[in-house]
Image: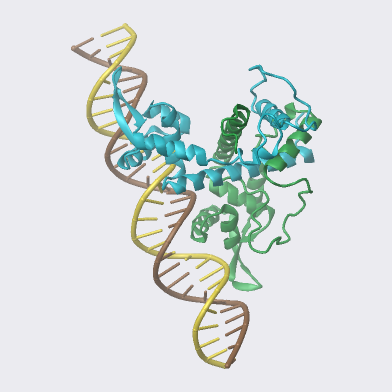
Chain colours: A cyan, B green, C brown, D yellow
Amino acid sequence: MTPRTDPLTLEVVELIGTVVARYHEEYEHAAAEHALTGAQARVLGLLAREPLPMRRIAQRLKCEPSNVTGIVDRLESRGLVERRPDPADRRVKLAAPTEEGRSTAEELRAALGFAREPLGGLTFAERTVLKELLRRMLGMDADDGAEDTAGAAGTDPGEGAAPLR
Amino acid sequence: MTPRTDPLTLEVVELIGTVVARYHEEYEHAAAEHALTGAQARVLGLLAREPLPMRRIAQRLKCEPSNVTGIVDRLESRGLVERRPDPADRRVKLAAPTEEGRSTAEELRAALGFAREPLGGLTFAERTVLKELLRRMLGMDADDGAEDTAGAAGTDPGEGAAPLR
DNA sequence: CTGAATATTTCATGTTGTCAAGCAACCGGG
DNA sequence: CCCGGTTGCTTGACAACATGAAATATTCAG
């Protein structure tokens, strides 16, 4: 059923591997610019959206909670994050970004040029197609609506939407 | 200039992040099945294609050579890899998979279902489109990818299939 | 109240990563 | 030939990340 040896499929798989590698590089580099490790940047990014209990962070990172303790410790010792008690459950500690942590997270997000940068080379229609293909690859079946084109790759100008680069 | 706020672009960026996360999960899981870490699996995968000097491995992994020493040490102690002298240069040690290492690498490659599995849901035409979009995203403008070994531009070939990290 | 389950931390241990220092081997002049 | 500079690999010290087991505090169900 699955075309394992299909050269086209293999090439796509290879390309995805390259995308993954590139993504990592960018991520680590952006983190390093702020003297953060990849893991620290990831946690800070999570908390910037919303404060979280330690165990939730562990779930997001897919690691043991005991690991998160250390990562948050380091962020806290730099004043980027603080632990607060959860009023609803005294066992729980909520990790939340400080003001400095929030701005660092924002700069970090902004620096994450990958995929935004090269995406500029694609037209609006192409980006739409890419979005759909990725969604299907990930098993998110196209449901959310706002569906128009799909399929029309060649028809150039997405102009109005976002020219860029 | 860059449409940072363009919702379509942001969604694609988000999707790519998800793809990266999924890829990692699959990779680590497949490695763990063989009691290997991600880094070990990556190195073994590299060597399965072709024995390499330590420094080349470091370049592919984008890390310091001293790090590679440890990783290869662990692979060697499990009998998956061996160090051989390079007849052309006695400073160099070539890391090469043993027979067992080769078969482990093969099983590992076969287990890497991600992106092949879900790609089955895409038609041939869709996969072709996806391939092209990814290539352009990566800045490989539509020439063929047949550059492989052949020490391309002197110092930093970097290209190819170096997944992760 | 008692006992099971949950949330976090601490400790021991192993892997990955960096950097600096060291050794062996190659190389290009003199 | 020898000599200094460079290259390839390893070693050592150290930090971060990751797991697992045990300890503590709190919640919750009976």
| Residue B96 is at least partly visible in this image | yes
Q: Compared with residue A74, is residue B147 higher up or lower down, i.e. above or below?
A: below
- Residue B96, x across and y down, in percent: 63, 58
Q: Could you tell me which residue is drawn at 66 percent across and 57 percent down?
A: B157
Q: Could you tell me which residue is drawn at 64 percent across and 52 percent down?
A: B46
Question: Which image quarter: residue D6?
Answer: bottom right
Question: Which image quarter: residue A113?
Answer: top right
Pick the front one: C24 or C26: C26
Image-based side of A113 in relation to B160, left or right: left
Q: Compared with residue A71, is residue D29 higher up or lower down, i.e. above or below?
A: above
Q: Compared with residue B9, is residue B142 higher up or lower down, i.e. above or below?
A: below
Question: Which image quarter: residue B84?
Answer: bottom right
Pick the front one: A91 or A31: A31
Pick the front one: A74 or A35: A35
- Residue B40, x across and y down, in percent: 55, 49
Q: How many marks?
A: 0
Pick the front one: C17 or B36: C17
> Which corner quadrant holds the N terminus of chain A?
top right
Q: Could you tell me which residue is drawn at 61 percent across and 39 percent down?
A: A115
Q: Could you tell me which residue is drawn at 49 percent across and 45 percent down?
A: A30
- Residue C26, x across and y down, in percent: 61, 77
| Residue B99 is at least partly visible in this image | no
Image-based side of A71 in relation to B71, left or right: left
Q: Compared with residue A129, is residue A36 higher up or lower down, i.e. above or below?
A: below
> Which corner quadrant holds the C terminus of chain A?
top right
- Residue A44, x across and y down, in percent: 42, 36
Image-based side of B134 in relation to A23, left or right: right
